Every structure is written in C-alpha cells, then in structure tokens.
Image (cartoon, helix red, strand yellow):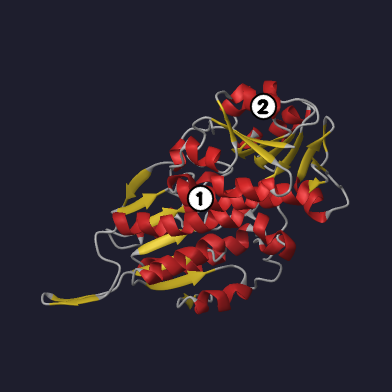
C-alpha cells in the first residue's frame, strides 16, 4: 500500500502532511510513502531527508496521484476551495483522501469529491476520545496558533511583557486577557505567562477553571448561567444572543484593563461568536493589542478584518489567518504524527479498511462509494 504526499497548493500554506520521521513508522506496517519533489521545502525539509528514510521522491503531482492508494494532505476539498478543485480530476474510485476538508461549512466540496469515487476522511472530525488523541489535528494546530498569537501580540505591543526592575525604574508587567480556554487559549496563557505577563482568562465552560489556574492565570467568573454551554467532544456550544450580550457586558471591564486581548472562541461549523465589540475596543487603552485567532471563522472581534491588521481608536487589532502555517516545521511535525496515526488505524493486512462500525472511522468518514455518508 502506498501513501502519497503532494505539495500544498492553498495560498500561504507551508505545512506538509508527512515528515520523514514518520516514513519508517509506516513502513513497519507495510505502508510505503511517495512524496512529490519539493513538497516539504516550505517547511524546511529537503527531499533528501525523505529518501534517506525510505520514501520514494517523484517529480510530479500527477505521478503521486496515479500511484497512491491514499493521498495525505493538509488541505483538501473545501479547505482549499480554488486550487484544490484541480485535484478532483486526478482522483480515482477506491482512492482514500485524508486531510482538513471543512465538511461542516463547505458541504458542496465534499459532494464534488464524492463524485470522483474516492473516499474522504476529514481531520477536523477526529472524535475527541482517549484512543483518538494522537490523531487530533485540530488540537495540534491550535497549540501552534495559541503560541504564535502571543508572539504576534508581543511584537505589536509598545511595551514589554515581563515586569523588570532596572536602574531606570521598575516596569510593570503587561496584562493579558485570553478569551476561550480551549487548546489554543491554554497555550496562549502558557506562552504569555512564560513571557512574564499577568494573565486572566475566560471560557463559557466553567469546567476549564482548574486548567486555567494550573497555568498560573486567573479565571474570570462572569456569574452567568452556563448550563449546556459545553457541546460534544468538549467543544463550546453555540449560545443565544441574549447570553452573548450579557457575556460581552461582563467582559468589557476586564478587556478595558488589559494591554492584550487574545480571542480564541470557536464553535465547530458555525461563524465565530462576536465577543469583543467595537465599543469594547474603544474602551481599551490606546496602544493595546487584540489578536483574533478566530478570524478565519469571521472573528471574535467586531472590528477584525480577516488577514489584516487595523488600528481602531488607538488599539491595534490583528486578525491573522492560518497561524500554524507560519510555524511550518513543527506544525508539520505534529500534523504528520496525527496523519500517520490515522493511517495506521485504518490499515489492516496491508490495505485500508473503512469500517463503518469503528467509532473513529465513522466520525471522520465524509464520502465513500460516490456518496456523502456522514
């Protein structure tokens, strides 16, 4: 059985689906790897590194698609809506495609892929259960995004993060407010604390209080009724507008005292909730910074412009897209482990078995035998 890895074609995407370290891991299960020449160049990995680990390096994308039983990618179908369509003509019946596919927000792309006869497994649908932890690419990439968001904030803030006592006097520590304490938020807390900031964090799910406090941050309690706020898999559930209004009112005071606000709140398949309003930004001190990690889903900040940095009322608002791709070496390393674990889960006796009774496969399987089956 052969797993094919191709160069990512989404603009700005610098990650690669498999790194050389996973090639011998797959080989022990009888799985070979073919890599398009230059596929990992943007991630800082040369073709020679693959060859040394036993992978086959082939010159063209078309050759990889012709030879491979499984195509492993970072972005497929709906997650690469324009350039990704060109790959549909290269797919064949019986092939398996694994990658981020945006099936909840781009279902038509999944339908288009299904008509090729190939099967699609979406990495964002990996269930959050114990035995699938090593496959959870959303958590892996959120870790990178939370880390990088704080570095962006530190670069844009006109003050230092740590408290310093110098001959010129004592410099107060920066205050950071993290909205959303999922994986990205927790990593943002940890990174900001390491840089020396005083950190506060809020999440609609009160169960994360202990995780926030374990990282040395103060959990902000808004005294709201959060019953039913946690959905399946530990994700936050979409809340009504009245709840969001009262939530924003409660957060306004905390945001006004912060030097940096990092927003990470997202609901699977939905537009990101607006938690930081225009008025809240206007209530922050000039020179403060907002980093909106949820920009790809519309943004948690009302003044965010996805992919841009704007200044509103003296506050710098960053709305970066695809943050994991800005740290491609380690993001690829983490994602590659996720992909390899999925492949090993699917391979039985040298071939891919898509068992609909397996809870992991059933959760991830979007298309099969010419139909959308999720």
Foreground pick, 283 / 213: 213
Residue with the mark numbered 1? 331
* Residue count near mark 1 (Cα–Cα under 10 Å), binned few <14, some 14–19, many ≥20: many
Residue 245's quadrant in the figure? bottom right
Question: Separation of disc 2 and disc 1 at Cα?
Answer: 24 Å
Q: Is residue 252 visible?
A: no
Which percent across, then down, holds residue 342?
Answer: 71, 50
Q: Which residue is mark 2?
A: 65
In the rendered image, residue 128, in percent from the top left (x then y), is placed at 70, 60
Mark toward the viewer: 2 or 1: 2
Residue 123, position as x, y percentages in the image: 67, 47
Q: With 273 as the anchor, is 29 left or right in this view?
A: right
Q: State the SS at label 2.
A: helix
Q: Residues within 10 Å of mark 2 (few under 14, many from 20)?
A: many
Given the current orientation, which residue lies at the most extreme left position?
167
**Is 248 situated left or right of 136 in this image?**
left
Q: Secondary structure at mark 1?
A: helix
């Amino acid at each position: 059985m052969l797993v094919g890895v191709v160069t990512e074609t989404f603009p700005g995407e610098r990650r690669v689906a498999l790194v050389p370290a996973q090639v011998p891991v797959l080989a022990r299960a009888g799985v070979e790897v073919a890599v398009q020449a230059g596929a990992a160049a943007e991630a800082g990995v040369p073709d020679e590194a693959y060859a040394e680990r036993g992978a086959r390096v082939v010159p063209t994308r078309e050759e990889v698609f012709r030879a491979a039983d499984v195509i492993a990618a970072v972005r497929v179908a709906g997650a690469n809506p324009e350039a990704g369509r060109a790959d549909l003509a290269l797919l064949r019946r019986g092939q398996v495609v694994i990658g981020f596919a945006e099936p909840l927000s781009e279902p038509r792309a999944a339908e288009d892929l299904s008509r090729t006869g190939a099967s699609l497994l979406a990495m964002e649908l990996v269930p959050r259960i114990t035995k699938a932890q090593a496959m959870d690419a959303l958590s892996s990439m959120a870790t990178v995004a939370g880390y990088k968001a704080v570095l962006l904030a530190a670069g844009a803030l006109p003050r230092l993060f740590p408290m310093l006592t110098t001959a010129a006097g004592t410099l107060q520590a920066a205050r950071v407010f993290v909205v959303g304490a999922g994986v990205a938020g927790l990593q943002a807390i940890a990174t900001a604390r390491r840089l020396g900031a005083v950190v506060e964090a809020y999440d609609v799910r009160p169960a994360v209080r202990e995780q926030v406090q374990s990282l040395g941050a103060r959990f902000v309690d808004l005294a709201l009724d959060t019953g039913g706020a946690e959905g399946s898999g530990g994700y936050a559930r979409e809340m009504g507008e009245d709840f969001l209004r009262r939530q924003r009112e409660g957060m306004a005071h905390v945001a006004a005292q912060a030097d940096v606000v990092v927003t990470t709140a997202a609901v699977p398949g939905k537009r990101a909730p607006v938690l930081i309003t225009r008025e809240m930004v206007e209530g922050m001190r000039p020179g403060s910074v907002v980093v909106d990690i949820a920009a790809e889903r519309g943004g948690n900040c009302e003044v965010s412009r996805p992919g841009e940095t704007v200044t509103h009322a003296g506050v710098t608002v960053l709305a970066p897209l695809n943050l994991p791709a800005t740290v491609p070496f380690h993001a690829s390393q983490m994602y590659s482990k996720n992909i390899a674990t999925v492949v090993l889960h699917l391979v039985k006796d040298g071939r891919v078995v898509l068992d609909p009774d397996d809870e992991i496969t059933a959760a991830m399987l979007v298309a099969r035998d010419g139909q959308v089956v999720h």
